Amino acid sequence: MAVVTKEIQDSVSSLYIAFFGRAPDAFGFNYWNNKIANDGESVFKIAADFALSPEWKNTYGSLTAAEQVELFYQNTFNRSADQAGLDYWVSSINGGLPFSTVAYQIIWAAHLGGNSVDPADTALVNNKIEVAEYFAIILASNDTVIASTAFFGVTQDPTTVTAAEVRLTIAVNTDAVTVTAAQASELPAGYPYNLSDTSENLATASTTILNNAIKITATTNATVAEATIIEAATNSGTSVIVSLTDTAANIAGSSNAVMNIVVGTVTASDAATVAQANSMAAFT
């Protein structure tokens, strides 16, 4: 039996990133690694197979060549395609080059780096590959929903890799993903999740998104109005707000329930009257 090399693993991870925008599930990762290592299958043949899958067709199948390239850039590089690159690859696709070949060529070139590649693209792709392989090898998870959240928050910064690995470990161990309010709307119905987002985003999220969360964490300073909406969620007993700032009148007019989910400082933005100060001091 041939050895599955790091290069083979990186190739397979790149395909999952490019075609599905997610980390590979452990079963699929091992299957395709073995197809390359033991059956001699080429990466381009596997890329073509990926392009026949329902998962790929649901994402890319109905798009024009320009839309396919643009979505690929967003999924892979977290940015729009530059016009020159877009024109070149669209021309190649319209000239008969399969999109599967285009996608793999672009992401593999970014992985390898070089003078003609944006270093930011190389750093981002390699960080995503590292997270992808942590999920498939270390966590060995087959949960494709968690896999679809693997790259949330991953940037060119290597510290985001560590943060993603911690988040994924918790998700696999608890069977619940941690997502923003916008990301929660993309999850399958009924899939368990925790919300972690800005106070503003949480306060403007739908009641359904808030009520279905296991836990809600507001990562930015909140107003009393925002905190009140978050506290009203069904599972608000496990909600956390990092800090709260508002007028003395608004804070004094709030409730114990709202104040109890603030784990950090509560700051009045103006001077309080004696009555307001007494009301704020009464919160437990």
Image: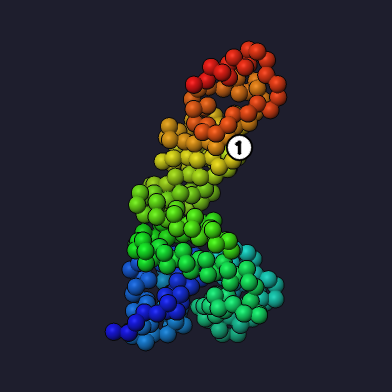
Q: Residue at x 40, y 63 (%)?
A: 135
Residue type, mark 1 in image:
Asn
- Quadrant of the rendered image containing residue 40: bottom left
Q: Residue 108 at what x, y percent from top left?
A: 53, 78
- Quadrant of the rendered image containing residue 243: top right
- Quadrant of the rendered image containing residue 109: bottom right
Q: Residue at x 55, y 42 (%)?
A: 219
Count of number-bearing discs: 1
Q: Residue at x 37, y 77 (%)?
A: 33
Residue at disc 1, secondary structure: loop
Q: Please say if 116 is above or below 126.
A: below
- Check the picture and name the quadrant holding the N terminus: bottom left
283, 31: nearer the viewer: 283
Q: Which residue is mark 1?
A: 221
Residue placed farthest to the top in the image? 275
Q: Residue 54 at what x, y percent from top left?
A: 42, 68
